[in-house]
Amino acid sequence: MTDLKNRTRAQALEAGFDEVRFTLPTAIPAAAGRLEDFLEAGRHGDMAWMADAAPRRRDPATLWPDAKSVVMLGLNYSQPGDPLMLLNEPRRGAISIYARGGDYHEIIKKKLKRVAGWLHRESGADVKVFVDTAPVMEKPLGEAAGLGWQGKHTNLVSRQFGSWLFLGSIFTTAEFAPDAAEADHCGECRRCLDICPTDAFPKPYQLDARRCISYLTIEHKGHIDREFRLAIGNRIFGCDDCLAVCPWNKFAVQAREARFAARAETDGPELVELLHLDDATFRTLFRGTPIKRTGRDRFVRNVLIAAGNSGDASLAPFVEHLLGDASPLVRAMAVWASARLLDEAAFGKLREGHEAKECDPSVKAEWREED
């Protein structure tokens, strides 16, 4: 089995993975309690799928009782430059590094299937592959396997790749000797906690997703509470602040996988261009990226918040056009953005022409908030 383990690692590296480690399905007993505390506190927000799949998520052995080993694989997605620089350009939208290139789900799944298929043919062992969307606790398993450790921001940190490591897993009936777990190397550092614009970390190693900009701009389906809108700034899809300031990033190197490189449409796009997106254009523009799964309405909601924070009055006519959008989610944020971009007289005139015609309660509430 030692020989098979070495050859499996070699196959994974040949498939393009940057890290390959092995652990057991029973290696993360403490994770179940942490998950339960997270859910009981309601910190998962409206991500109901986390609670629905909790019985399988809390224990990998429950997900697939026949599995004897878990192969944890890491894929570096680090890109050149400072991901926080775009925050100083309010007329452009800041998109999280992970979403600027091709959809990592599809890229990683193909690589996982290649390695898993080889393992099955070579050993006869059964295999199942998982990447992100399945109820697998990749970060605790990655820590147990030695890929890195869960930092104070709850994300996995690698001594070799810093914060920029996608995770995938192969569950198998093959029995591999587990690798040593990685120790915590955060020390006294709390940069990730202190930089968070919305105070999403109640304590070190704890996250309240309901306050996290990544959750709010990607997972949250409804209206974003007013208390968070200014803090969102020009972040239109995700947030890299807590990842980008980690000192361990000094060891990170640029990703080998070319498909993770930013595309023209995701590399700081101009807000004025995004305010024109209808559903068909949105789908075409972001085809093959993680952004597409969020949907046009939520994405334009985020763009409107960024527009309202931009201080650029030239965006006001394009925002005003969205006051007549079919989506109440979009119309509500268009009200808020208009109030930020126009002076009191101009906004009052705009209000006279739109508020009386509005029938959705959530949008009416936005008009009332601007009294």
Image: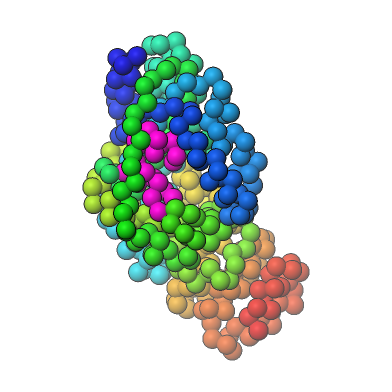
Instruction: Judge whether 299 appears above or below 65 on screen.
Output: below
Instruction: Judge whether 63 appears above or below 351 on screen.
Output: above
The colour scheme used here is rainbow
User: Quadrant of the rendered structure where residue 224 is?
Assistant: bottom right
Residue extending farthest to the bottom is: 345
Question: Horizontal placement of 173 versus 5: left or right?
Answer: right
Please report the residue visible at 44 percent of the width from the left and 66 percent of the height from the top.
197
| Image coords of residue 226 (percent x, y) | 58, 71
Q: Is residue 153 visible?
A: no
Please report the residue visible at 57 percent of the width from the left and 79 percent of the height from the top.
339
Q: Is residue 137 visible?
A: yes
Which of the pair 119/97 is nearer the observer? 119
User: Quadrant of the rendered structure where residue 178 is?
Assistant: top left
Question: Horizontal placement of 80 versus 205: left or right?
Answer: left
State yes or no: residue 150 in magenta: yes
Which of the pair 363/78 is nearer the observer? 78
Question: Horizontal placement of 66 versus 179: left or right?
Answer: right
State yes or no: residue 94 in magenta: no
Which of the pair 166/72 is nearer the observer? 72
* Magenta span of residues: 139-158
Please report the residue visible at 52 percent of the width from the left and 75 percent of the height from the top.
316
Please report the residue visible at 32 percent of the width from the left and 59 percent of the height from the top.
189
- Locate the C terminus and report the quarter of the image it occupies: bottom right
